[in-house]
Amino acid sequence: MIKKHIQLLLIVLTVTLISYSCSSHKLIKTEQDGIPNHPRIILLEGDEKELLKRIAESDDLSKINMLVISIADGYVNSESIKRKLIGKRLLQVSRAYLKRILFLSYSYRVTNDEEYLIQAEKEMLAASSFSDWNPSHFLDVAEMTTALAIGYDWLYNDLDKNSRQIIKDAIVNKGLLPSMENDQWWLKATNNWNQICNAGMVLGALAVYEDEPELATEIIKRAETSIQLPLNEYEPDGVYPEGPGYWGYGTTFNVMLFDAIANISRFAQGFKASEGFLKSGGYILHVCGPKGYFNYSDGSTNCGFLPVITWFSAKLDNNNLLWNQRKHFDKLINRQSSMNYQGIDFSFLPFLLIWGSKLSSFYTDEPLLNSWIGEGVNPIGIHRTSWKEDAIFIAIKGGSPSLSHGHMDIGSFVMDADGVRWAMDLGAHNYYALESKGINIWGVKQNSQRWNVFRYTNLSHNTLTVNNQLQQVDGDAKIIKSSTDENFRYTVVDISTAYKGQLKSVIRGISIIDNKYVMIRDELVNIDTTGKLRWSMVTHENIKIIDNNSAVIRKGNKSLKFHVVSPKNVEIRTYSTDPPNDFEDKNPGTKMIGFEMDLEPNQEVELIVLLVPEGTDMPNKINLDKINDW
């Protein structure tokens, strides 16, 4: 009996030594490659101690930490989500898993309460059991890989051994390897797809590095080259070409990539935040006006909750960048029910604690600059009279309809005053609603089906239309002049290329004069045939036309004077914003205001429109200087 026990003990010791030798070999090899032990992604091994110290020192951080944990509590003992496509997308399911796993894994890291570990493991096993993560729409794969990479890495040392193997295999076989198949178009893209897909694949590669060092290295090196494409789009001033709505999405994943790879000395040098990327913290600050974003491209006006702003603020030591986030922080801290906990950006709330713990405060004084000009592939000019809720705010854009998520909105503008958005952009349309009706909204050639959607065209934007024609997709408008003078802030955009074949040239200037009212001035030259020009602006439906040149727009108890200075012989009109098709959403509560004029061959025309807030008298003397003399 004793002999058998000794033999059994020797077998156990031998297996243990072999097992230890194998794991030791992996550990040594990983360390030699400059890869730290798990957890190694963003919140490193032992980082909890400093994080909890900072949380304990801040009432605000403590309250947000409690909120994260309470949300994780809601996931405990819940059923995992099934694999269900909506249209061609699994994205809603991937996002739900990303949110669940991140909240649960974070809560376990800071509490050591095993109920979070058990539920996170259950969620990861459920996702791992899917037949695939829908590689035909690779964003779905990227977000699911991100979810499992974080959970696998953060919980690595406490996961059941068999579960760990299943999750690791899923990351490799359903995440990383599908990215190596075919010619993945997003590797050559300049938009958010590149950022999200590369981030997901790199996080997945880092998570499984010790088991798949060659595959992981190949994926990381591939991303090092590919990620430069969207980074270049931020240059030189930080403008995000797809608009502020997509800034939070693409930029957050890009920051996660930077933050994860920064801890890996072997690869960190190839992943540096560019100057333009860092400047985009200023872009997202300024592009939010009193009544919301300048929502060009496929965007909404909602200046939403963006945890990633804390990364920029800490990185640049600039708390001014947090200005627009203050109301969101207050809602979080006070657990206000009006806080939208369902948006994609809210899924990253645990990172607010990780990145925000490096800040001295979540609050700041009013930003110093009232004008911001951003050059780049989709340039914009932004001006305001102050950072108060009743300030005048204007913003105008150039760029091209051919850009990702682009609209035919070249020369379009928005305008706020007295707490109302008077000049509006109808913004994004639900993609699935259009796709489900057979509309291909992703082509951007001149004859693409995308341009059958009314709200994507110049016919629904605050710009010019000639002979009811569409703007030219290959147009590329640049800012040619601007000023930050407090009595005459302006931006001038040459939008001629958007009207190639329709007008010889057209320049638009938009300005705030004497901090009192807005002027839009267009100077154009017609081609050598007759034509009809329309000037239009989307606004609220309550419009009273006073005379041929004047109207009053009302919203509640507020009003705005709309006055055409030049030409004098026009007739102000209103236009319906209802789309001329049955597959598109209506735009209730809105109308367009504007005017039309006949163009003679080679005619030179000046258009001057004033937008005067309530309580401000019409100016006695109007600046009629040509844009050249501004």
Image (cartoon, helix red, strand yellow):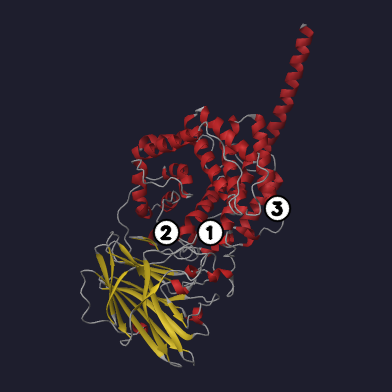
Q: Which residue lies at the image location 67% right of the left edge and 58% below the top edge?
A: 184
Gap in Å between the C-alphas at discs 1 and 3?
32 Å
Q: Is residue 607 above or below residue 31?
A: below
Q: Nearer the viewer, residue 200 or 498?
A: 498
Q: Nearer the viewer, mark 2 or mark 1?
A: 1
Question: On the image, numbered disc 1 is attached to which residue?
Answer: 433
Question: On the image, numbered disc 3 is attached to which residue?
Answer: 180
Q: Amino acid at mark 2?
A: Ile
User: Tag on residue 327?
Assistant: none
Tell me where residue 307 appears, x and y as whole percent.
44, 48
Gap in Å between the C-alphas at discs 2 and 3?
34 Å
Mark 3 lies on a secondary structure that is loop
Q: Which residue lies at the image location 54% right of the left edge and 63% below the top edge?
A: 232
Question: On the image, numbered disc 2 is attached to which residue?
Answer: 284
Q: Amino acid at mark 1?
A: Ala
Label 2: few (<14), some or many (≥20) within 10 Å? many
Mark 1 lies on a secondary structure that is helix
Asked whether the viewer can see residue 161, the reply is: yes
**Residue 520 placement: quadrant:** bottom left
Q: Amino acid at mark 3?
A: Met
Q: Is residue 290 above or below residue 108?
A: below
Gap in Å between the C-alphas at discs 2 and 1?
28 Å
Precedes in sequence: disc 2 or disc 1? 2
- How many tags in the picture? 3
Tell me where residue 584 appears, x and y as whole percent.
50, 64
Precedes in sequence: disc 2 or disc 3? 3
Tell me where residue 295 appears, x and y as whole percent.
43, 63
Q: Is residue 69 left or right of residue 141?
A: left
Precedes in sequence: disc 1 or disc 3? 3
